[in-house]
Image: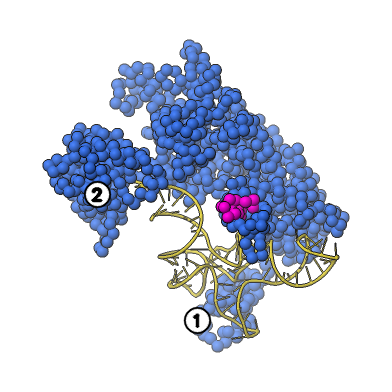
Amino acid sequence: MTDSHGAAPTGSTDVPTFRYNAAIANQIERKWQDYWERERTFYTPNPTGLLSDVNVERAALPKLFILDMFPYPSGSGLHVGHPLGYIGTDVYARFMRMSQRNVLHALGYDAFGLPAEQHAVQTGVHPAVTTHEIIDTMRGQLRALGLGHDPRRGIVTTDVGYYKWTQWIFLQIFNSYYDASTDQARPVRELLLELEEGIRLPDDDGAPWADRSDLDKRVYLDSKRLAYVDEAPVNWCPGLGTVLANEEVTADGRSERGNFAVYRKPLRQWMLRITAYADRLVADLDTLDWTESIKLMQRNWIGRSEGAEVDFAVAGHDATIRVFTTRPDTLFGATFMVLAPEHPLVDQILPGEWPDGEGAYDYPPARTQAWRGEFGETASPAEAVRAYRESAAAKTDEERQADTRQKTGVFTGAFAINPTNGRPIPVFIADYVLMGYGTGAIMAVPAQDERDWAFAEQFDLPIVRTVAPPDGWEGKAFTGDGPAINSANDSVSLDGLAVVEAKQLIIEWLEASGAGQGTVTYKLRDWLFSRQRYWGEPFPIVYDEHGPIALPESMLPVVLPEMVDFAPKTSDDPDAEPEPPLARAAEWVEVELEIDGEAARVYRRETNTMPNWAGSCWYYLRYLDPTNEDRFVDPDVERYWSPPDSPGTVDLYVGGVEHAVLHLLYARFWHKVLYDLGHVSTPEPFARLFNQGYILAAAYKDDRGVYVDAAAVQERADGTFEYEGRTVTQEFGKMGKSLRNAVTPDDVCGEYGTDTLRLYEMAMGPLDASRPWSTRDIVGVFRFLQRLWRNCIDEDTGSLRVTDEAPDDETRRLLHRTIAAVRNDMETLGFNTAVAHLIELNNHLTRTGVAPREVIDPFVLMLAPLAPHIAEELWERLGHASTLAYEPFPVADAALLVADTVEVPVQVNGKVRARVRVAAGADEASHEAAAHADERIAELLASATIRKVIVVPGRTINFVIS
RNA sequence: GCGAGCGUGGCGGAAUGGCAGACGCGCCAGACUUAGGAUCUGGUGUCUUCGGACGUGUGGGUUCGACUCCCACCGCUCGCACCA
């Protein structure tokens, strides 16, 4: 503690003994944190089960589930930015407890994953050890913030008792398939039953079900599961020895952690069939109370687009190229095709030599020459294709991005047939077509697509407009709506139709002629779910010689084996093969089991582990019933907290926008699977989502561009900044270790107390806005608490100053206006204005110099959600025997909200010229009369013609004159 | 490039289409003080000939009345980035 600020304890001589300062605040805070723990104040009752022992009468109240995005325990500790959301939810939770709701509010820890593992690798200390040390430290820091969590529900995802159920949910996913006819997940065993009974036929081209071998049947069923093994190109990071999720790779293709190179490499990996839910994940967004921007990000990520698949025959080959297009109406204008460079069909359709002259249909030789572009000198299409692929592969991502204007590609020598008119059109490969989207091939319609236009210009390709641009159109591609032109053949004519109608008609024609059909495509891909890491949940899967087998539920949990050497095998060789650390645990991997009554035999365990996201997909459900050893959550408990009429289990979910897509999408997916299988009663996990802003802070760079310790920077008189005598430049950024601008809650609590920190974080701006931290400003709310304390407690004697005298009328009315305002602010998470209203009321009491109990009692209750420790202390000193946590929040007396008289501004031509007092509820005529009675107004109106008078009773009077 | 959001004092921010700048910081003055970077009291948008005039990024519009609604532009932030 320093000798600066009013926080200095009773060291100097003339500071009153009982003044509210940091020492007294800290003492009060510790006292009440101990009280809440001892009295189990925030134990939230379940209606049944193990957690129905305390406060059980409250389970009869309507439930409210408030959730924070739980923290990842990080070695660098907490700064004041981290708890912003936690304080916000705590204030709301405390308010709702006082509003007679049974509030569930808890905080667990998301502790599996790469950061902890890397830290462990670097220090050589096992991640289980460091993780628990860090969690203990964080629990201490968060306890000091006075958060009213139910401590029994604070699960840790790395505890066996938790991840057993993560594995159990994986089994539910593995043992399910998506039934397109009922549009829901169903158990695979039901599919098997229907196949065996012939109710359903296999949808592949294979033999009748009864004729299939057991192995064929197993392969078929495995191909239908929501969790399946597939070969997929993934982000392989040999420097970390693991594959990485897309979000763990930076924009320039390196690992977020450690900055190692990342390569695309096809590997056999576990995938979860999230794409089966794409439509529902989009559609159900409409039922959620989330910000539009987050919904939009999810919609964009899922990337649903409607269109058609069209088959183009390849001239001279027994092959067809299937394309996806959102503009089937422009099919008549498709003058060439483009395949992704790695499209599997490319090598099949390459002719032996360049088709010039005769072999190039009607295209003149000058043109076909141009199509070869920079590869014009190559001897054959095959060589040109090889050269182009090499040049494309050599490009970095940055070069590719810079190239978005300049199209590159090469003619394959092959021609395809436009199904509308039989015209042969050249087939190209180009890297602006991506293998991973649609079918990896496009029909190019330069007249209606800017990219295709650019390519056509580059390679001298024909352009045929099939949508008439508006008169005077001087642009290139026209992507807007307009009547179709040049779009007719013997069996169909789109000419004159608008885009929507044309699409519909051409799809009918495509389907009738067998050349294609309407379809929907998504940008969303199945979720790559395995990692070559040690520090994650093991899969409940073993292998026999044919493939994966799910362990029965009775064999859970599959415990992560203790390993001394848990480090991944790393290298700088892009061709190195991943080696999961668990593969080295030989005794664990080889396991003899009796599965499903089969004879005991040796299996190999799955050695990949689950990604970090798995544990966070369902933690909110475990909060409901954290100690249940028989179920992931008891059905009765689940139904209590997720009544079927609620749009989602969690009533309010608060967290940063950085999880807008991945975590929130993954969790919604898991929840929907559990919903389909009847394990949860709501179709969505999070009914309302609120994104809190970030706390920003000034950071300072020296002339080398290196960040210096912001706490040691001084501001000069001229507004510039210096650090150790050198000039540094200021910028603002997210608070944290890397910018060296972190302020810890421990610092603020030590200097002012936790209540001041809480109040400051709530007062500094709206919860959803990012705002710069300003240590200098904290003293404002500290003074507020100090004044409130002084109004209630004599600073010299410590005795209560509150009187039983009735407040004067003005004070009483102000109290009730404050109650109405604060209550409204609490309901709408407008904590910044709630604080302002309380400060106003307190300033009024300070001015009048009296503290009537009739005002102080409700004042303390209103303050309690924001600054609970000082509120509890004052509440006790006011003579109340127990905690105020469940006292009813004050209700304003409506009669006191309407004043006897109100001051109304009088405008002349919209400008305020005077204010007059009128009786509350006075009619328009009285308002007008009062205005005329005003000297200044009378003067202004005397020499003018009144054209109109607008009176909004209680609001304004406006004279329109000329 | 596309999409979304946001522009209010020196600073953080308030304002169901009806008194712009609540509340806080800072600043100014005063009180108490050996002292104050503690605490308390008062003041504080700009200009002003002291009547008032002007003020919510810029320009226009709707309205008796616009920070608020509409259009265009400028600036900042975020997301996506050849998605066919």
Foreground of the two, A368 or A147:
A368
Chain of the residue where label 2 is placed in the rendered structure: A
Foreground of the two, A934 or A397:
A397
Query: From the viewer's perspective, is A233 left or right of A491?
Result: right
Q: Specify the chain shown as blue.
A: A
Q: Secondary structure at mark 1?
A: strand
The tint chain B carries is: yellow
| Residue position for label 1 | A947
Q: Secondary structure at mark 2?
A: helix
Q: Residue furthest top?
A: A599
Residue A639 visible: no
Q: Which residues are magenta?
A: A695-710
Q: CA distance from mark 2 to mark 1?
A: 71 Å
* Percent x, y of residue A476: 28, 57
Foreground of the two, A413 or A324:
A413
Which mark is nearer the camera, 2 or 1? Answer: 2
Where is residue A576, by image quadrant? top left
Q: Is A697 within the magenta?
A: yes
Mark sitting earlier along the chain (2/1): 2
Residue A429 visible: yes
Chain of the residue where label 1 is placed in the rendered structure: A
Residue in the image at 49% along x and 48% along y: A294
Query: From the viewer's perspective, is A13 left or right of A744?
Result: right
Q: Amino acid at mark 1?
A: Arg
| Residue position for label 2 | A459
